[in-house]
Amino acid sequence: MKIKAAIVDKQNADWQIRDDVELAPMGPDDLQIHMVASGICHSDEALRIGDAVIGYPIILGHEGSGIVEKVGPEVTQFQPGDHVVLSFYACGNCENCLKGIPTQCLNYAHNNLSGTRPDGSAHFTENGKPVADMFDQSSFTTTTVVRERNAVKVPKDLDLRMLGPLGCGYVTGSGTVLNTLKPKPGDTIAVFGTGAVGLAAMMAGRIAGCTKVIGIDIVDSRLALAKELGATDVINSKGIDVVKAIQDLTDGRGVNWAVDTTGVTAVMEDSIKALAQGGTTATIAVTKNHIDVDTWTDLCVDDKKIVGVNMGDSIPQIDIPRLIKFYQMGMFDFDKTEKFYKFDQINEANADSRSGKTIKPVLIIDEDYVPGN
């Protein structure tokens, strides 16, 4: 089946939308998805520029939303016409999946970041040559095929165009707080970087009952949105001692919890220094950067902890519906971070994301889609 897709031919190249891509046939537990929209995530950019590498040419995109067109004979949870959000693929059979931790699937890297389908076959080809995929999904396409475990059913009365980023950015930020850190009511949290992931973490801190939810960034417009979405305090860290500023807001103690979404070495280190005794920081950015930690003072004497978190330790089939319920209750206004672009504006949308002009760009792949239908 021929489809249209946005392809990156080599490291740091722009996306090119081409209509000669061949989509692999469906397997027995596959869904064929008519793509409506897809968010652009920092991970897409990291793979485009080569900070993380799968291979080229590649079709990226992993925050897709769409409508089921066909189902394989072994599919039990979906039928044609269902509206879905797409996320990562977990095998469901390994020890960690059976423990209920699909983000730690022992086959995670192979299934999502090898450039092929889980069985090793090519997801896409062009002129007979394989094109690498991402997350067994590659949502920068007009049609894709995914495994049943990639998909999460969502209500048909919601606007599919805005829901795709729930599959990665929003579930990563919120899940880091709600699933991994698990703050108690009355705790304090600081979120470094108020992009889509950071704002999701910040809103989750508010949902969890933190009495101090501090947003840190160097862009005033993002900090203004952070306040609108529930931050108790915001700090523009450009040119100031952000650790002292956080201590001043917490009676000199520091915060119980911190989340770094920037991947910048100095910022990650500040997120540790800003912790109260016994506090924990979660580093969740895709980055090549390293940090320097004082293992004696920070980790031993002050009993601080540093954790890495993949995809918010989420179970998409549980966490995404939970976020939708929070949204419907007015507690998780993720749509305020989004801006829509046409599919052929993908390079402009990505540039706006890199510059900070747009927090969460969403590509509208099906411009004829009407919400609620």
Image: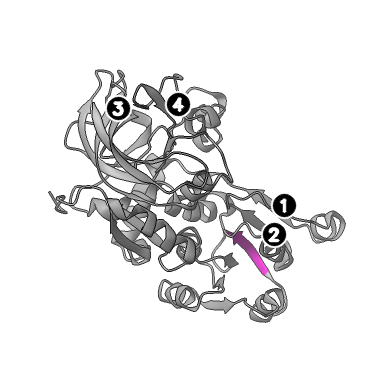
- The answer to whether mark 4 and mark 3 are in CB contact below 8 A is no
Q: Judge the density around disc 3: few (<14), some (14-19), many (≥20) Cα neighbours within 10 Å.
A: many
Quarter placement of the N terminus: top left
> CA separation, marks 1 and 2?
6 Å
Q: Nearer the viewer, residue 196 or 287?
A: 287
Residue 59 location in percent, x, y?
A: 40, 38
The residue wearing badge 1 is 290
Ranked by sequence position, the earlier of labels 3 and 1 is: 3
Q: Is residue 113 above or below residue 174?
A: above
Q: Can the viewer see residue 77? A: no
> CA separation, marks 4 and 3?
12 Å
Q: Judge from the rendering whether residue 175 lies leftward or rightward of residue 297; answer left or right.
A: left
Residue 227 location in percent, x, y?
A: 45, 76
Q: Nearer the viewer, residue 48 or 94?
A: 48
Q: Which residues are magenta?
A: 255-260
- Tag of residue 265: 2
Q: Nearer the viewer, mark 3 or mark 1?
A: 3
Q: Judge the density around disc 4: few (<14), some (14-19), many (≥20) Cα neighbours within 10 Å.
A: many
Ranked by sequence position, the earlier of labels 1 and 4 is: 4
> CA separation, marks 1 and 4?
29 Å
- The answer to whether mark 1 and mark 2 are in CB contact below 8 A is yes
The residue wearing badge 3 is 23
Amino acid type, callout 3: Leu
